[in-house]
Amino acid sequence: MKKFTLRTISVMILCALAAQAAACGETGGEKETSADSEQTTAPETEKPFADNLGEYDFGGKDFTMLVRTSRADDLCPEEATGDVVNDAIYNRNAKIADRFNVTIKSVTLDDDGSLWNKTLEGDVMSDSGDYDLVMPDYWWGCETRGFFLNLNDYDVLDFSQPYWCAGWNDSAEIYGQLYCAVGSMSLDLIKNNIAMYFNKGMIDDLKLEDPYELVRSKKWTLDKLNEMAAAALSDLNGDGKFELGNDRIGYTFDLQAGRALLPSCGMKVATKTADDSYEYAFMTDKFVEMYAKVYRLVNEYDYSVYSNGNIETMQGEDVYSIFKSGYVLFLGSGIRGTDNLRDMTADYGIIPYPMYDENQDSYYTFNYGTPYMSMLLSTKDPEMTAVMLEALNAESYKSVVPAYLDTALKGKYSRDAETAEMLDLVNSTSFFDFTFVNETSTDHIVMWFFDQLASGVENIASAYEGRKSGFENSLQKLLETYKEAADAK
């Protein structure tokens, strides 16, 4: 079995590349993953790998990933620590490294879009090929800069498999070109899903309907949220005002949870056309009605409090602490918020965000973003990278996702079997609008709608009319860029 060692090198050269664009904070580091960790022998009847790859031996080559500093532990931990998720990732890397005879390394780069664009451009222009795989954040716009290879050109990448995120990849593909993809390697596909936390004791005390049953019967709607949140409102200190932290509030939410309100009601900004293009055809009477109902929830009801984009520092107190103290019935936040509720004494549950009404075909879960995976034009061995991408995502689906979802999240944080059931529903209904995947190139239109809600803009049809030509021009420019590239082949 091939053996790795752990060591650290500087990435000061990366900072130098971006010096004109952004100040470089702490330098990142390179770390190697050991392949000599213990592996559990699979039963003879079990398929040893989740992918359909054949035999490959890459002769001990380095496989280097450029990753965001904040996501390094989710992709290439330095050692096994006994933590179930950390060790699942560590063992995944070791298993794949040993299987293909490679050395998996990672180089970290600060979470700065300008720095990433400068670094990727520098590698492509110099043809240095320092990175086999790059994983920037989706909203930095790197994918439209002409840095990347078309992933559809590599047959070993089977995007029909469940370890790839079809909801993302389908929206990232334009005219047959796919420059970035998302799969099970990214735990943000789970962690960044927005869900609704509720105080179970308060539900019982107020004799409200069981949220789990409401979800199962598809009666968990925006109207039902309003009804239950209103029932929870109470001026506990008798000062005639309703304040988060001092009184009992029905529903509070942060920026990302606010952005989830319209998508959970079925808002889809871009529609795919017959010629594999996209158009904006969302401004209908139904959409205007949907916006008006969400507008009232955000702006007009005392029982609903928006934390102005920062859920951690509202009125000087951590909002998770307020929820844990029993002052909030419903809290909107990401699944990663479970980390803040580990020590909550009162029982809580998790459910998806509500539908607009009972006629909606499904619950929709808003995910507020993920790093994606791409290959630079300067990648020295793209075939090896394609094989590693397929294998790492497949193995993540088989071992890492269950470790996080089943063992860590369901076992460590959730309080009942129903919550585990709801987590499965939340994750299975995650939706990515085309304009979200291409947020920078579409002038942030998908986020613009909640900005209007938060700013108190009531007449959305009029507000959109003032921005319509600009939004449509941005869309056409994006489509033309991809069309020109497709026609040039």
Image: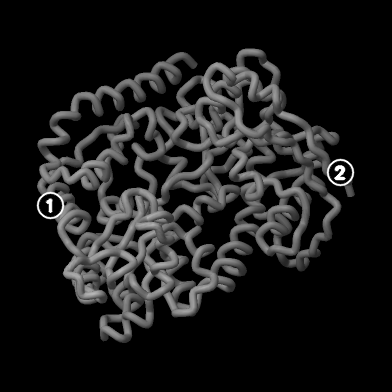
Choose top left, top right, bottom left or bottom right for residue 265: bottom left
Q: Is residue 248 left or right of residue 101?
A: left
Cα separation, mark 1 vs mark 2, equals: 60 Å
Q: Residue at point 78% right, 32% down?
A: 9
Q: How many tags in the picture? A: 2
Q: Quickly name the residue at label 2.
A: 5
Residue 152 x/y as whole percent: 53, 32
Residue 358 visible in the snapshot: no
The mark closer to the camera, 1 or 2, is 2
What residue is rendered at 41% in x and 54% in y?
A: 313
Kindly identify the residue that appears in the image at 68 percent across and 39 percent down.
Answer: 387
User: In terms of secondary structure, where does tag 2 sit?
Assistant: loop
Q: Nearer the viewer, residue 442 or 69?
A: 69
Q: Residue furthest front?
A: 239
Q: Which mark is residue 327?
A: none
Q: Where is 386 relative to 164, above or below?
A: above
Residue 314 drawn above or below residue 465: below
Residue 489: % across, % down = 49, 16
Helix, strand or loop at disc 1? helix
Amino acid type, callout 1: Glu
Q: Earlier in the sequence, mark 1 or mark 2?
A: 2
Q: Nearer the viewer, residue 442 or 164?
A: 442
Q: Amino acid at mark 2?
A: Thr
Residue bearing the label numbered 1: 289
Mark yes or no: residue 297 visible.
yes
| Label 1 Cα crowd, 10 Å radius (few <14 / some 14-19 / many 20+) | few
Q: Is residue 369 left or right of residue 363?
A: right
- Image side of residue 131 versus residue 137, left or right: right
Q: Is residue 85 left or right of residue 428?
A: right
Q: Position of residue 23 (x, y in %)?
A: 56, 25
Residue 329 vertical position relative to residue 158 in the rendered view, above or below: below
Looking at the picture, tell me which residue is in the foreground, 367 or 359.
367
